Image (cartoon, rainbow, N blue to C red):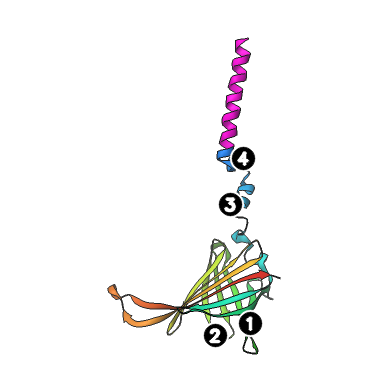
């Protein structure tokens, strides 16, 4: 009689220990795909870029400087395929005064496995971009300006777009570093329509 009671007591203790482990560490009971989805369901895997995000987006584009918000503009964004399987077409459009401004770009796949892309426009601008953790980052340098951009598409149908604009200084920092001042920040959160 003691042996069955002892056996039941041990089973109960094991069950309680496992129960508390799974409460304390819920991911232990999940499959790999459940873990991946539960980590952050909002952001996709890099394999989905840009194919899963084709379509039209709309929202507000905010432009700010050190004095505060300069403007908040209704903006539209679209991304689509082209005749070339390694090139996607995207464009931003917004109203400036009474005129609709449309900026068209091409996203070129350079090395999809390593996340390397190039962005160009029809005015001769071309710069590199890198996909890191579901966000496309680029930095480019013109005569007087350094621009940093990021595009972040989410599984929830959002596009977060950021531009940081810096003006180069003629002064040099310690160690002969080049100096620049951030003069403007532009942000948009657009929703797929």
**Magenta part, dominant SS:** helix
Q: Quadrant of residue 96?
A: bottom right
Among numbered discs 3 and 2, the one appearing first in the sequence: 3
Inter-mark Cα distance, 1 to 3: 35 Å
Circle 3 — which element? Answer: helix
Q: Which residue is mark 1?
A: 94
Residue 2 seen in the figure = yes
Question: Which residue was labeled with disc 3?
Answer: 39
Whether label 3 touches label 2, CB < 8 Å: no
Mark toward the start of the polypeptide (3 vs 4): 4
The disc at residue 124 is 2
Q: Examine the structure image and report whether residue 20 is included in the region drawn in magenta.
A: yes
Query: Residue shown at 28%/73% (left/top)?
Result: 174
Q: Earlier in the sequence, mark 1 or mark 2?
A: 1
Q: Is residue 91 visible?
A: no
**Front: mark 1 or 2:** 1
Mark 4 vs mark 1, CA separation in Å: 48 Å
Q: Residue at x 63, y 78 (%)?
A: 75
Mark 1 and mark 2: span between their CA atoms? Answer: 21 Å
Numbered disc in front, either 4 or 1:
1
Q: Which residue lies most toward the bottom here?
A: 98
Distance from disc 3 to disc 4, alpha carbons, whole Å, reads 14 Å
Q: Earlier in the sequence, mark 4 or mark 2?
A: 4
Q: Which residue is mark 4?
A: 29
Q: What is the CA distance from the residue labelled 4 to the residue labelled 2?
A: 53 Å
| Element type at mark 4 | helix
Residue 87, image x, y percentages? 63, 74
The quarter of the image holding the N terminus is: top right
The image shows residue 22, relative to residue 83, as above or below, that is: above
Q: Are dots 1 and 2 in contact, CB under 8 Å?
A: no
Residue 52, given in percent of the width and then of the height, sits at 67, 64
Residue segment shown in magenta? 1-22
């Amino acid at each position: 009689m003691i042996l069955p009671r002892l056996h039941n007591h041990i089973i109960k203790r094991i069950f309680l220990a496992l129960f508390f482990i799974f409460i304390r560490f819920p991911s232990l009971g999940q499959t790999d795909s459940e873990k991946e989805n539960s980590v952050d369901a909002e952001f996709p895997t890099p394999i989905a870029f840009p194919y899963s995000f084709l379509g039209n987006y709309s929202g507000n584009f905010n432009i700010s400087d050190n004095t505060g918000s300069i403007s908040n503009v209704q903006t539209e964004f679209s991304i689509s395929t082209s005749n070339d399987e390694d090139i996607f077409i995207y464009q931003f459009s917004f109203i400036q005064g009474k005129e609709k401004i449309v900026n068209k770009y091409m996203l070129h796949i350079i090395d999809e496995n390593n996340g390397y892309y190039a962005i160009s426009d029809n005015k001769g601008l071309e710069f590199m971009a890198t996909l890191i953790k579901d966000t496309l980052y680029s930095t480019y340098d013109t005569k007087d300006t350094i621009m940093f951009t990021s595009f972040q598409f989410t599984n929830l149908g959002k596009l977060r777009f950021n531009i940081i604009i810096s003006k180069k200084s003629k002064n040099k920092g310690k160690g002969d570093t080049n100096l620049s001042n951030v003069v403007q920040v532009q942000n948009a959160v657009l929703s797929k329509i």
